[in-house]
């Protein structure tokens, strides 16, 4: 006669098998996505958690569909650094999206209608998972953000500061220190068209690399720079396009500086990653004003 402890043991073994299958399926799907160069699309950030959560949620007679799904999602995230090859920043950025998908599917599986409702949820997530896999399935990627500040210096001193090599010694905003590559040194000076600025990024995720920009247009109170190349890990998330710097003297000791950054968003889905990237770039623009629009000796 089968005892209750034996039934509980059998259930635990079955649940563990389904968790392993879910993580294995997620790993296989990830490597296929990378081979097809779709790792920046919703197929990764929505498709994988959907598959993982559905497999676990369909565990035979689970004690708790929600608990099983969240357990598998947590396990997948914890081992993804080594198992899937993702870095800390990617895990950090993607985890809320993974948990959101897991909670929705777990709640659907645990509802009074555990068959129809999960199917409807699945049909909703399938089209969302293909965002970014084709230009016709993508939303507008072009972005422009800016930061404005009043600095305690004259317009002439702002221009002088901008003509020098960019500074990298000031501490970055906390958000930009959360595992992202950061500027460690920079080279280049001058305000004439063709003058270069080369910023070397290191630390955080990915290999060190340089962002190179050149001045395309220069006028009193205005600079326009365009990107020449970007070999840093940041190019995996967004494509820098241009920077516009405008400054206007307010009075003898104060100048209004506006730093605008144009970029192309590379991560999908847009509704999730667009706010993340715009916030990061806005903080970067503010940092650039603080670090480069004021003479270092001040």
Image: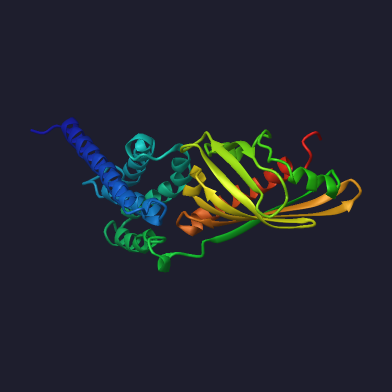
Camera-nearest residue between 116 and 101: 101
Which residue appears farthest toward the right when viewing the image? Answer: 252
Identify the residue at horizontal 38%, vertical 64% (top origin). 134
Q: Is residue 86 left or right of residue 198?
A: left
Which residue appears farthest toward the bottom when viewing the image? Answer: 136
Residue 110 in sight in this render: no
Q: Where residue 39 appears, x then y in whole percent?
A: 38, 51
Q: Where residue 147 appears, x then y in whole percent?
A: 70, 52
* Image mark count: 0
Q: In this view, does 142 lie to the left or right of 187?
A: left
Identify the residue at horizontal 37%, vertical 49% (top origin). 102
Identify the residue at horizontal 31%, vertical 42% (top origin). 68
Q: In this view, does 5 lie to the left or right of 213?
A: left
Q: Considering the image in quadrants, where does the N terminus appear?
A: top left
Q: Considering the image in quadrants, where does the C terminus appear?
A: top right
Q: Where residue 172 appears, x then y in whole percent?
A: 64, 37
Camera-nearest residue between 250 and 130: 250
Q: In this view, does 152 lie above or below 267?
A: above
Camera-nearest residue between 177 and 117: 177
Camera-nearest residue between 91 and 222: 222
Q: Where residue 86 appears, x then y in whole percent?
A: 39, 40
Q: Is residue 38 above or below residue 202?
A: below
- Describe the colour scheme in one phrase: rainbow
Identify the residue at horizontal 80%, vertical 57% (top origin). 220
Q: Is residue 73 above or below residue 249?
A: above
Which residue appears farthest toward the left when viewing the image? Answer: 1
Residue 168 in sight in this render: yes
């Amino acid at each position: 006669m089968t005892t209750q402890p034996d039934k509980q043991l059998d259930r635990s073994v079955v649940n563990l098998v389904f968790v392993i299958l879910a993580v294995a399926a997620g790993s296989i799907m990830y490597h296929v996505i990378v081979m097809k160069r779709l790792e920046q699309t919703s197929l990764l950030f929505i498709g994988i958690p959907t598959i993982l959560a559905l497999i676990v949620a369909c565990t035979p007679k689970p004690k708790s569909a929600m608990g099983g799904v969240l357990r598998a999602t947590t396990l997948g995230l914890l081992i993804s650094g080594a198992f899937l090859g993702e870095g800390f920043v990617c895990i950090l950025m993607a985890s809320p999206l993974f948990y959101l998908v897991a909670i929705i599917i777990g709640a659907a599986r645990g509802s009074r209608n555990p068959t129809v409702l999960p199917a409807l949820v699945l049909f909703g997530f399938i089209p969302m998972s293909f965002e970014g896999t084709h230009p016709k399935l993508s939303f507008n990627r072009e972005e422009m953000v800016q930061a404005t500040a009043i600095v305690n210096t004259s317009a002439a001193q702002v221009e002088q500061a901008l003509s020098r090599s960019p500074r990298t010694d000031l501490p970055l905003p906390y958000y930009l220190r959360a595992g992202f590559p950061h500027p460690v040194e920079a080279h280049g000076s001058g305000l004439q068209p063709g003058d270069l600025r080369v910023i070397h990024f290191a630390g955080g995720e990915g290999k060190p690399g340089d962002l190179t920009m050149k001045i395309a247009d220069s006028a009193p109170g205005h600079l326009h720079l365009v990107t020449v190349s970007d070999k840093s890990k940041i190019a995996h998330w967004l494509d820098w396009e241009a920077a516009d710097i405008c400054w206007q003297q307010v009075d003898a000791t104060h100048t209004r500086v506006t730093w605008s950054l144009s970029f192309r968003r590379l991560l999908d889905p847009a509704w999730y990653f667009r706010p993340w990237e715009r916030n990061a770039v806005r903080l970067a623009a503010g940092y650039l004003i603080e670090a480069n629009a004021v003479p270092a000796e001040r």
